Amino acid sequence: TPDLAARAAIALGLARTPPIVHAVDGVDLVIRKGEVMGLVGESGCGKSTLGRIVANIVEPSEGELRWRGRLQSEMNKAERHAAGLATQMIFQNPMAALNPRMSIEEIVAEAPRAHGLSKAEGRAYADRYMRMAGFDPAMKQRYPHEFSGGQRQRVNIARALAVQPEFLVCDESVAALDVSIQAQIINLFMDLREQLDLTYLFISHDLGVVEHISDRVAIMYLGRIVEEAPVGDIYARPNHPYTQALLSEVPRIETARRRFKPVGGELPSPLSPPSGCHFHPRCPFAMDRCRVEVPARLEVAPGHLSACHLNTP
Ligand code: SF4
Ligand code: MG
C-alpha cells in the first residue's frame, strides 16, 4: 500500500538526508526529456524507493517532485493525475505485476481504464501496444502463466504503453531475465525511446547494462546521489571513491558481463546511516571531516557532479 511504501521511504533514511528528488536550485536529480538516466547502487541504497517516488507510487517523506518544471504541490488534482499517467513503472518481476486470471488482451486493454481513460480505447488499441512491445497479438487470449519471463515483461511493457506514457521508470526490469532475453528487452526499450520519444529512469545494479543504455548515470549510496555524470565520463573518470570502488572491480574485457561487485565492507544499515559522508566507514581516503561534514555535490567537470571532500581540500 502507498502508506507502507511511504513508511519504507522514511525507514530508508530519506527523511534525514537532503531531499533527494527535489529539483529546485541545489538539484539532486534532474531527468531531462528524452534522456535515459541510469541509477546505480547496491541493494538497499534506496534506488527502488527513489524510483517509486519518481513514478508517483509513493510520496516523498521530504522534498518534492517536479514534473515539467512544476512542483507537484502547485498542481491541481487533474494535473497530478495527468503527470501520474505520463509516468509508468516497469518492475523486475513481470509475473507479480500481472493478474493471473486475466487474459493478455484483458490486461493490456484494462490498463487505460485503471488509469481513468476509456476501456474502449484500450481495447481498440490493445493489439497495437502488444505489437509495439514485441508481443504477438495472435496469442492475446492466453494467460500470463503460459508465457516465459521475457514475454511477460513484454506484456507489462504493452500495458504501460497503453497508458501512453512519456516517461518509464524501469526498476531492475531485465534483472530476472536470461542474458539473451535481457538484450532483447533492452533493445526494445531503445526502440520505444526512438518511436515514442520516451524518457527513462533506468534503475539497475548491472553496470554493463547501465553503460549500454544510459545517457547519464547517477550513483546512489544510502539514500544520496553521490555522483552524477554523462555516461562516458563517469565510466572513464569516476570521481567519487565509491564509484571508483564499484568500477575497479569491473572486468575490462569488452565481452565480460560488468556485474556490480560488492565494495569492501558491509553496507551500513540505512536506518542509521553513518554521520557526515555516509561512505566514510568503507572509504580508503576517509579524513576526520568526512565523519562530521556532509560533502556538498560539486561540479568537477562539465555536467559531472560528485559529493566528496577530496574535491575541496
Ligand atoms: Fe571518502 Fe571522505 Fe570522500 Fe566520503 S567524503 S568519499 S569518506 S574521502
Ligand atoms: Mg531494489
Image (cartoon, rainbow, N blue to C red):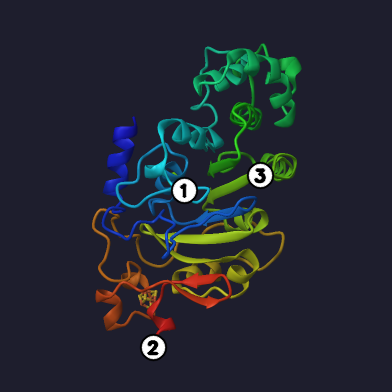
List x then y, in percent, for residue 155. Answer: 63, 26
List x then y, in percent, for residue 222. Answer: 36, 58
Residue depicted at 59% across the width and 47% down the height: 200
Q: Secondary structure at mark 3?
A: helix
Q: Nearer the viewer, mark 2 or mark 1?
A: 1
- Kindly indicate whether the residue at mark 2 contacts the one at mark 3 (C-beta within 8 angstroms): no
What is the distance, in whole Å, between disc 3 and disc 2 at their CAs?
Answer: 44 Å
List x then y, in percent, for residue 206. Answer: 56, 54
Q: Secondary structure at mark 2?
A: loop
What is the distance, in whole Å, between disc 1 and disc 3 at their CAs?
Answer: 39 Å
Q: Which residue is mark 3?
A: 179
- Kindly indicate whether the residue at mark 1 contacts the one at mark 2 (C-beta within 8 angstroms): no
Q: Which mark is residue 313?
A: 2
Q: Which residue is mark 1?
A: 70
Q: For label 3, count other residues whose C-alpha is less than 10 Å away and answer few (under 14), some (14-19) or many (20+).
A: few
Amino acid type of disc 1? Arg
Q: Residue furthest bottom?
A: 313
Q: Quadrant of the N terminus?
A: top left
List x then y, in percent, for residue 196. Answer: 70, 39
Q: Is residue 89 at all visible to an observer of this figure?
A: yes
Q: Is 272 drawn above or below residue 122 in the view shown? A: below
Q: Earlier in the sequence, mark 1 or mark 3?
A: 1
Q: Nearer the viewer, mark 3 or mark 2?
A: 2
Q: Is residue 261 at all visible to an observer of this figure?
A: no
Q: Earlier in the sequence, mark 2 or mark 1?
A: 1
Residue depicted at 70% across the width and 20% down the height: 125
